[in-house]
Image: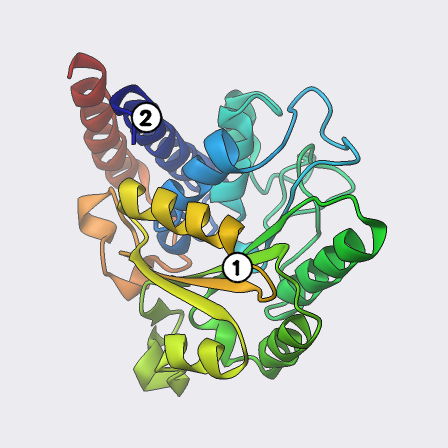
Amino acid sequence: MDASLKKQLQLDAVAIRKGVIEGTFNAKSGHPGGSLSIAEILAYLYRVEMNIDPKNPRMENRDRFVLSKGHAAPALYAALANRGFFPMEDMKTLRKSDSYLQGHPNMNHVPGVDMSTGSLGQGVSAAVGMALASKFSGDAFRVYSVLGDGEIEEGQVWEAAMFAAAKKLDELCIVVDNNNLQIDGTIEEVNSPYPIPEKFAAFGWHVIEIDGNDLDQVAAAFTKAKSVKGQPTAIIAKTIKGKGVSYMENQVGWHGSAPNAEQYAVAMDELNKAQAALEEG
């Protein structure tokens, strides 16, 4: 990857993480852990991978993105704000009763959101439908979706996976955010979906395994996915829940807890230092 692009993407990931912390702190609620883990994935999708136009969010031939793990809305909102769909300052209104940035994405109110999500398992089904529409219409837009590893314990996910493979939806690329933690503990403790790559392969998907917090691996995976024909692609991304904020990393308690004022200050200090180091480097 070009050094200047990589630096930009690293800065994007930091900006997304700052937006997540800003939003959940001001809301006094939300889901920071699984939002922080997908910052690199969203940075690459919205800066490089997807055909989008912040000035024309409903552009007909745009690529579509569905956040199937809809509770990670703070990360999606921050990614959209970072690319100019709306002001980053609006992250401070997250979950306020009069805000358009609610706890789960709403396609009717948030510029750049292609599907309202939150009920786990349903988002990826919508993404499959979009990919089928792309194939039927001949518009050739691509469809991307991010799922949680806890989310894939839902049976609906596997019905969607079966259908996508049966219809050879090579327009579809999903990412499983495999941070190994869900609200009640590790995914093995709750209801293990392991081995994840083998399951998607058995359903007829092309499978790529990566470190989802490594931008070079993220870039290589999405580039490969675009070359796959006759199969949907599943990128199984090993990530760190709470990535980028030291006290949140790999801590299950930050699945759905917001930082208090002291914790907010520590998190923003760490992220501001990371940003400064990148800008000076």
- The amino acid type, in three-letter code, at marker 2 is Leu
Q: Position of residue 42 (x, y in %)?
A: 46, 41
Apparent side of residue 27 relative to residue 212 in the rendered image (left or right): right
The residue lying toward the viewer, choosing from 39 and 103, is: 39
Q: Which of marks 2 and 1 is in front?
A: 1
Q: How far apart are marks 2 and 1 (CA)?
A: 24 Å
Provide the secondary structure element on which disc 1 rests: strand
Residue marked by disc 2: 11
Judged from this view, the residue extending furthest toward the top is 280
Residue marked by disc 1: 174
The quadrant where residue 163 appears:
bottom right
Residue occupying the point 25% across, 23% down: 3
State the colouring used for the structure image.
rainbow
Q: Position of residue 232 (x, y in %)?
A: 57, 64
Alpha-carbon neighbours of circle 2 within 10 Å: few (<14), some, or many (≥20)?
many
Apparent side of residue 13 relative to residue 46 in the rendered image (left or right): left
Residue occupying the point 75% across, 36% down: 61
The residue lying toward the viewer, choosing from 197 and 204, is: 204
Residue occupying the point 39% across, 81% down: 198
What is the total number of numbered labels drawn onto the structure image?
2
Q: Position of residue 225 (x, y in %)?
A: 48, 53
Work out whether 259 lies above or below 15.
Answer: below
- The amino acid type, in three-letter code, at marker 1 is Ile
